[in-house]
Image: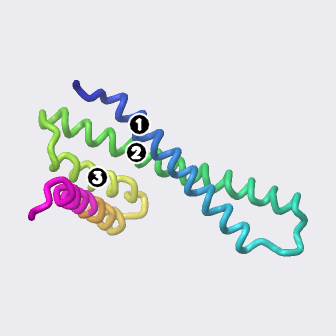
């Protein structure tokens, strides 16, 4: 079965948004519980938790959803241009996603993010290879 570009976009964008929203909201709840003022009423405390979780969840969700969208676009573009889906496409798309995502911060942060993305992708591929085909 052939992969569909729109399916990848929807999956990676949606999964990124939901993951970011959940993690961002959870960290906000933990921070509010840990650093909240003990003299606050229960109603005020709940309001603070809901506001902070909504704010951080939306922000983290939008960031990770954007990362997922950029990755899916780059990966599918590389697969279409090269005519094959191989580890090089995965590594290049991941490195490109990191560089694009941090490009607003300047050349150096974009380069570091791109290199980090490529190294993480390569580590994932190597780790997956050792897990699937362990050498005895």
Residue drawn at x 32%, y 38% as measured from the top left:
73
Check the picture and name the quadrant holding the N terminus. top left
Classed neighbour count for the residue bearing mark 2: other residues with Cα under 10 Å, few (<14), some (14–19), many (≥20): many
Q: Residue at x 14, y 60 (%)?
A: 134
Badge 1 is on which residue? 11
Q: Nearer the viewer, mark 1 or mark 2?
A: 1
Nearest to the observer: residue 56 or residue 127: 127
The tag earlier along the polypeptide, 1 or 2, is: 1
Q: Quadrant of residue 56?
A: bottom right
Residue that numbered label 3 is attached to? 94
Within 10 Å of the Cα at label 1, are there few (<14), some (14-19), or many (20+) other Cα atoms?
Answer: some
Say whether residue 129 is magenta. yes
Q: Position of residue 36 (x, y in %)?
A: 77, 71
- Residue 89, given in percent of the width and then of the height, sits at 19, 46
- Callouts 2 and 3 close, C-beta under 8 Å: no
C-alpha separation, residue under disc 2 versus residue under disc 3: 10 Å
Up/down of 67 relative to 85, above or below: below
In the rendered image, the quadrant that contains the C terminus is bottom left
Residue beneath label 2, please?
68
Q: Which residues are magenta?
A: 120-136
Q: Nearer the viewer, mark 3 or mark 1?
A: 1
Relative image position of residue 37 (x, y in whole percent): 82, 74
**Residue pictured at 13% horizontal, 36% vertical:** 84
Q: Earlier in the sequence, mark 2 or mark 3?
A: 2
């Amino acid at each position: 079965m052939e992969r569909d570009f729109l399916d990848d976009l929807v999956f990676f964008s949606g999964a990124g948004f939901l993951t970011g929203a959940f993690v961002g909201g959870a960290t906000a709840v933990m921070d509010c519980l840990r650093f909240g003022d003990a003299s606050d009423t229960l109603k005020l405390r709940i309001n603070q938790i809901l506001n902070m979780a909504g704010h951080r969840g939306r922000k983290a969700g939008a960031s990770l959803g954007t990362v997922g969208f950029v990755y899916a676009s780059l990966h599918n573009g590389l697969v279409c241009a090269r005519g094959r889906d191989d580890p090089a496409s995965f590594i290049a798309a991941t490195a490109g996603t990191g560089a694009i995502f941090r490009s607003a911060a300047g050349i150096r942060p974009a380069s570091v993010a791109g290199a980090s993305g490529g190294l993480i992708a390569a580590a994932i591929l190597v780790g997956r290879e050792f897990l699937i085909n362990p050498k005895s």
